[in-house]
Image (spheres, rainbow, N blue to C red):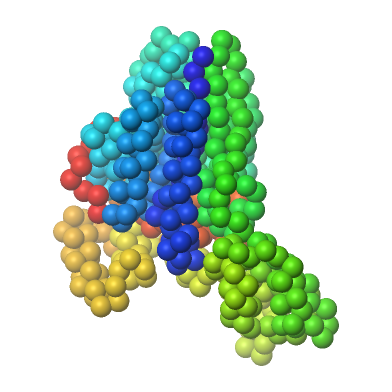
């Protein structure tokens, strides 16, 4: 019998709502998974990608991850993982560094044996490069086999990657496919093979209302048992206020008082035919009631002389910008520059020099780095995919993370770069020289 924790989409380093406390929450959720793994004395922790929220995690995020991985190592619990679209770099991956330190195993074509299970890995691969995949793996002689992948696979919602094709073309017969990328936990069977998403470990978007968690997977005899477990994360208060005619801010305040907002994230949605309400006033009141942060979405139709009827969302101004950038079909390099300009981690006084340095580096690596993406439909201001030194800057960027929602709040989970791998069919060894 082999027992593992299947987790993913931890998005360590995501400073949601520009809150340092929320940034810490994502690391804390991963630490909870590690604690549970040690308490349960599992045989391994299997991570299905997007350990980090973006490809340039800051030092506290790296140190926090190293501390958690050392705890697993001290407990003799291996950490097996693949690279997701958010964290991928153009050269060596952070996962490669952890592997060099003896704290992780990067899954790929070769089987990683844990107990009586052979684990394989399939890093995230952009749609435009998937026709190159042959799904050929090194054979194994273990009683069970599992493939760990990152992407939106059938038959789940918003899928663009056919699980049936993977299973049919693979030379290895898998008992289970353990997936990441979709933040919704789910499980089904495809051609008699268990296929499951573990979901995210923290709410990366206000649309993620269900509790967060991970999968506890047991391989025994001829069976695979998959059970979802929840994590205790920061509470979100989802407050809908239906304003009748003549009702306004006082009704909103009355409704907000009905919720325990102590250290919670308050998500307030306004509907109905009531008076105009200033979102800032609602957010301020919610914080006064104890909320860590508050965001307001006004779903009402607002009639102006200059604009047609529209839904106005104040959940995060960056969402609207990311939406527009996704439509523009920019190159990965252009998105890299956008990240430098808008990222909170770059001080305003340093933006000019940082942009100059980034553009110089990008053009020296590839004179066509700033050429627009060929396929705007696959381009996004957010997601980062697999990496390749030559194709990185011009590869289309996919907006496929967190399909739990298709509205503007979805882009809160996005990172900045998407590029194909040199050998997209599986993870590979690579130089640690480029983590930029």
Residue at 74% from the left image edge and 82% from the top image edge: 250
Is residue 153 in view from this perspective? no
Quadrant hosting residue 194: top right
253 displayed left or right of 175: right
Q: Residue furthest right?
A: 245
Q: Quarter of the image for the C terminus: give it.
A: bottom left
Regarding residue 430, the answer to whether it shows in the image is yes
- In percent of the image, x 79 and y 83: which residue is there? 247
Tell which of 121 and 28 is nearer to you. Answer: 28
Q: Position of residue 316 (x, y in %)?
A: 53, 70
Residue 259 picture location, percent across and down: 70, 65
On screen, 90 above or below 369?
above
> Where's residue 227, x and y in %?
61, 30
At 45% from the left and 13% from the top, the residue drawn is: 116
Instruction: Please give left or right for residue 86 compared with residue 164 in the image.
Output: left
User: Which residue sits at x=46%, y=61%?
Assistant: 21
Q: Quadrant of residue 91?
A: top left
């Amino acid at each position: 019998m082999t027992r593992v924790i299947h987790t993913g989409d931890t998005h360590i380093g995501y400073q949601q709502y520009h809150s340092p406390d929320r940034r810490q929450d994502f690391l804390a959720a991963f630490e909870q998974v590690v604690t549970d793994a040690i308490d349960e004395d599992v045989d391994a922790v299997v991570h299905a990608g997007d350990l980090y929220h973006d490809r340039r995690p800051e030092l506290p995020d790296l140190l926090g991850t190293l501390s958690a991985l050392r705890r697993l190592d001290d407990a003799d619990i291996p950490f097996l993982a693949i690279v997701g679209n958010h964290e991928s770099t153009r050269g060596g991956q952070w996962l490669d560094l952890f592997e060099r330190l003896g704290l992780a195993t990067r899954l790929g074509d070769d089987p990683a044996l844990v107990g009586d299970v052979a684990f394989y890995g399939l890093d995230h691969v952009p749609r435009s490069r998937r026709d190159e995949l042959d799904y050929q793996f090194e054979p194994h002689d273990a009683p069970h086999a599992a493939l760990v992948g990152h992407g939106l696979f059938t038959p789940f919602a918003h899928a663009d990657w056919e699980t049936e094709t993977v299973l049919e073309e693979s030379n290895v017969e898998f008992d289970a496919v353990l997936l990441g990328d979709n933040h919704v936990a789910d499980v089904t069977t495809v051609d008699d093979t268990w296929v499951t998403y573990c979901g995210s470990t923290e709410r990366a978007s206000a649309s993620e209302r269900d509790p967060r968690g991970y999968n506890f997977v047991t391989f025994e005899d001829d069976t695979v048992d998959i059970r979802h477990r929840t994590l205790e994360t920061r509470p979100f208060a989802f407050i809908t206020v239906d304003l009748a005619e003549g009702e306004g801010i006082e009704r909103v305040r009355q409704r907000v008082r009905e919720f325990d907002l102590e250290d919670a994230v308050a998500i307030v949605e306004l509907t109905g035919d009531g008076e105009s309400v200033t979102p800032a006033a609602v957010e301020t009141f919610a914080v006064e009631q104890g909320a860590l942060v508050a965001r307001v979405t006004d779903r009402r139709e607002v009639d102006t002389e200059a604009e047609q009827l529209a839904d106005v969302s104040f959940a995060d101004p960056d969402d609207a910008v990311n939406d527009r950038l996704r439509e523009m079909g920019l190159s990965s390099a252009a998105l890299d520059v956008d990240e430098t300009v808008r990222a909170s981690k770059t001080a305003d006084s340093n933006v000019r020099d940082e942009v100059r340095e980034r553009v110089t580096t990008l053009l020296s690596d590839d004179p066509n780095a700033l050429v627009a993406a060929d396929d705007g439909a696959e381009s996004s201001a957010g997601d980062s995919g697999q990496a390749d030194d030559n194709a990185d800057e011009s590869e289309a960027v996919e907006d496929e993370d967190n399909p739990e929602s298709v509205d503007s709040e979805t882009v809160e989970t996005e990172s900045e770069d998407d590029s194909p791998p040199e050998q997209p069919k599986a993870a590979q060894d690579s130089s640690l020289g480029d983590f930029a």
